[in-house]
Amino acid sequence: MKSIVISIFLILLIGILNKPVLADDIALGKAKSETCLGCHAIPGYNNVYPTYKVPKLGGQHAEYIKIALISYRDQQRSHNTMHANAASLTDEDIDHIAKYFESITK
């Protein structure tokens, strides 16, 4: 009996923690990411100063994008342009943007 209760609890917990990606989340992320696409959607794009290859974000794991954007927003990661772009983003905005980029396969 105890193992059944634990199993049910774990199933419910997984259901609560595993929030599905909704089409609305992706649509909101697409709307919020127009600025991002100016650099991150150009194959082989190089930043001028400091010079480095700008990473493509399509298909990247949402969790990685969230961590990066929060780090830029909170100025824990170094890049002035990204600081400016992320400064006004809420946690919810960042979640939507991350889900949008993760949904792009090409």
Image (cartoon, rainbow, N blue to C red):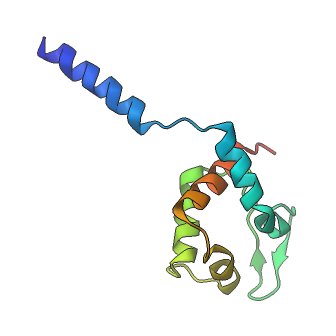
In this picture, is 36 found above or below 99? below
Q: Position of residue 97 (x, y in %)?
A: 66, 56
| Residue at the image point whose x is 73% and y is 65% from the top | 55
Furthest-top residue in this view: 1
| Residue at the image point whose x is 75% and y is 45% from the top | 104
Q: Is residue 59 visible?
A: no
Q: Position of residue 81 (x, y in %)?
A: 70, 82
In this picture, is 12 found above or below 5? below
Horizontal side of residue 51 vs 83, given as left or right: right
Quadrant, the C terminus = top right
Q: Position of residue 65 (x, y in %)?
A: 60, 59
Furthest-left residue in this view: 2
Q: Nearer the viewer, residue 22 or 79?
A: 22
In this picture, is 20 found above or below 72? above
| Residue at the image point whose x is 61% and y is 60% from the top | 93
Count of marks overlaid on the render: 0
Q: Could you say which quadrant of the image residue 47 lies in?
A: bottom right
Quadrant, the N terminus = top left
Horizontal side of residue 76 vs 94, given as left or right: left
| Residue at the image point whose x is 79% and y is 68% from the top | 35
Q: Position of residue 41 (x, y in %)?
A: 83, 60
Q: Nearer the viewer, residue 90 or 56?
A: 90
Q: Is residue 94 visible?
A: yes
Q: Could you say which quadrant of the image residue 5 lies in?
A: top left
Horizontal side of residue 53 vs 42, given as left or right: left
